[in-house]
Image (cartoon, rainbow, N blue to C red):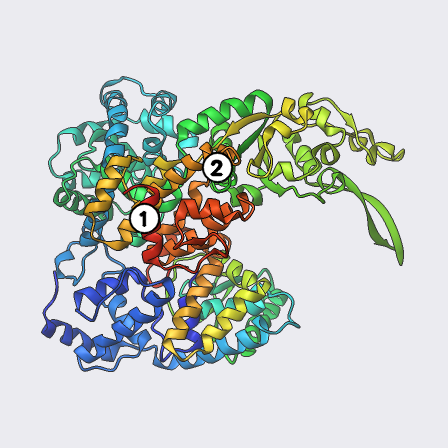
Amino acid sequence: MPRSEDEIRTLVENFEDSYEDEKGIDVASKAFHIFWRDKMMNNAVKQLKELEDLDPIIRLLDYNGKQSYAFSNNDDREALRTRLIQSGSQYGLTYAIDEDNQSLRIQRIFSVARTMITRRDWYTIFLDLKANVDLRNRLERAFSEKDIHSLSTQLQDVHILNSGRTKLTPPQSYAYQCNALPE
Amino acid sequence: MPISAMLFLSNPLTWSSVLSLEDRKVIIEAFDLGQWAENWSYGEKLVYSNQLIQNFNKKFSINFHPHKLATFFYDKNVIPCWQGIGADDKDSYLIGSNERLRRILESQREENRANWENIWAIAEPVIKTIKELLLSAKVVERDRIESLRKTLPPEFRKITDFGFGNWGDKEKQNKLLQNNDFRKILKDMELVQNPDALHEDLKRMLKQRGLGVTGLSIWVSYVRPDMFMPISKNVLGNVRQTLHLNRFWGSDSNITEFLTFSKGLKDTCEVAGITNMYEAAFYLMKYETGADTRATPAPERFHHLKRILESKKQLILYGPVGVGKTFTAKQFAVWFLQERYVEPKEEVGRSFEELQRRGQADLVQFHPAYSYEEFVEGIRPFPSNGGVDYRVRPGIFRRMCEMSDDGLSRILIIDEINRGNIPKIFGELLYALEYRDEPVKLQYSGADRDAKDNQRYLKVPSNLYIIGTMNTADRSIALLDTALRRRFNFEQLMPDYDFLATFLGCGPKFDEGELKRKYSEDNRREKRIVILSLLALKKLNEKISANKKLGMEKQIGHVLLMRLTDNPEKNFILVWRHDIIPLLEEYFYANYDELTRLFGDQIVSPTSGIKNFGIDELEEALKKLCEV
């Protein structure tokens, strides 16, 4: 039941005031660039660690990224707090951390989307990208491409290279998730 | 993979990223933002649709950057992402989920109606019996229901499959079935016109242990299939994301949502001409599993394979290139292990990759250099105190044999089994394949005096099954080692045109006359070339089979044409130019005269070989080949 253009216009105007993600995008983008350059494309980094390397980035990409980390005692808590703060600061992210029921919780800053894939899938994706030089090089080129026609070709190349690789590509049924593009 | 979220962070001000392709299409059409082209490649869809979405800014004289636009569409319910079917204020949304559901149901119905009618003919009396039991029997046992469910066609059974494990808990289920309150609600339900009247009763039922909305939906569907759809994992496992039914996710106790959903679903189904909610469930399951389900061979075939695998414990699937031998082996492995395991089934992987992760199956590919040392056991150097120590390291086969000591069934797939030197790779275990559970002394561990008996000897347990695949275009099975032939059962796979016709959306089976009629009547080129390829493949294989130099083992498998579902015009050329014709070139030992006779001199020159032809030339050549 389409709304009238006037109704849409009102919705747009109301939305202006409620959108609050403006500031977060820039910080998140810078963090992603650091991650991509220093961790993903840096061949000296052989293995990506979940908490230290990947969690901060997954949290930016996906609203459902891991926020809480359990600890068992005071020493453990402080060590965990330090690890979490450092995991963010290496990417230029400043975390505010709350304590809640034997766990530390990172206050939300910004997330691109609700991708509806599991965290385990995100880890798999990144570990796979790290291992697959060809695929990550192609993505690297796509990230810096400015010409839209070349970009479409490069994304198609990534798609072809990725097709049939079930570990990286979520199954068919994911192809229609909200807020995430297929494959 | 969610590439778009990463692309967004790489270049946030120019990249829209966070709208799904499906939603972009809907938005573009609803706001008339430009022309969405189905024949765009995936990359083009991503980029060009993004350009079109930007037109929304122009249309409403705003300047939202991509993330702001996407958030506007999703979070402000312009696209009702987080609401869904049957939401009370559904009409106030710009683009309702109900409309999307209707489109899915109608398209799936067009494709799968005949299939559904066959399944329902078998299922209906069983469902009626279950219903009578639930409503009238004094005592209903879970096992009685389960034995009835086993007589349902497998695809129907999936619809009513709990899938979450609680069905496996007999005690809980029996308790539920013997609960008078529960039975009374089911009886009341039989006559009720508006399910809202049962709201409080159902809510009370949900407090029963082991019963969530999913389980409840299955029970009530037995009694009122005209009103309730079973929300089993197989039906809505992922479709609920498509249909934005996230409210069921993690909120199994929400009966209001369930009733609202059921009413909305019923209304939408009526518009689509569907009155049986099982039918809707069937189409949604088809839609969800898409190519996966369509690509799965018929279960009847699996029952046949099961019989022959169980007789010798080892089986070889053989056939020409591209008939899906490895694919079938993997799919069958999943099905077979699911069949063999006692419930709860969720302990068995639902995909081959999951089986591998859980150690329930594995795959190894033989090649000429593959050896006993890799397959069974070999001696490997290990660093030790600054020097090197040599120890026996078990290979994949020994590991699987040892793991199978737990009595659970396992499957090892040996891909391209004929490319390895079988007697050399299996060694003394070739004997053990036949005499299962008898210990055989191993070549290396057997000679180690310090080793314990269970390390020196190996038994191939009777619960370890082996499936080999073999390409007969390389080598005929007649040339196989007789020792191997005796120990394996053999099953031939051939090009499956009926399956391919269904997969490509050209009808429920391969019907040459019907396909030729469709070809001449359909104006859409992308459809015409798919039909033509299908007809040409069949004709080509007939000619190959009749050719004395080639024979039926050199036929071209149907898998090669499956790529035509995606961007047919582009893949039409790719498949024929780079897959099929070069394969024939190899079979004919580059005798181009033969190829020219088949495809004409616009495609293959008798002197210089395969030409760089275009879509028009290829279409003409295939038309001549299959006499359209």
Kindly state the secondary structure of the residue where label 2 is placed. Answer: helix
Q: Quadrant of the C terminus of chain B?
A: top left
Q: Residue at x 34, y 57 (%)?
A: B615
Marks 1 and 2, how far apart at CA: 24 Å
The image quadrant that residue B398 belongs to is top right
Answer with left or right where residue B380 lies relative to residue B406: right
The image position of residue B232, as x and y in percent, is: 33, 40
Q: Nearer the viewer, mark 1 or mark 2?
A: 1
Q: Is residue B33 above or below residue A116?
A: below
Pointer 1 or 2: first along the chain:
2
The image position of residue A50, as x and y in percent, is: 56, 63
> What amino acid is at disc 2?
Thr
Kindly state the secondary structure of the residue where label 1 is placed. Answer: helix
Query: Which residue in the structure is indicated by mark 2?
Result: B328
User: Dot 1, how many residues are within 10 Å of its Cα: few (below 14), some (14-19), or many (20+)?
Assistant: many
Nearest to the observer: residue B530 or residue A72: B530
The image position of residue B419, as x and y in percent, is: 65, 40
The image quadrant that residue A41 belongs to is bottom right
Q: Chain of mark 1?
A: B
The image position of residue A3, as x and y in percent, is: 11, 66
Answer with left or right where residue B178 lies relative to residue B431: left
Which label belongs to residue B530?
Answer: 1
> What amino acid is at disc 1?
Val
* One can see residue A13 in this view: no
Q: Residue at x 55, y 71 (%)?
A: A84
Q: Quadrant of the N terminus of chain B?
A: bottom left
Q: Is residue B416 above or below residue B28?
A: above
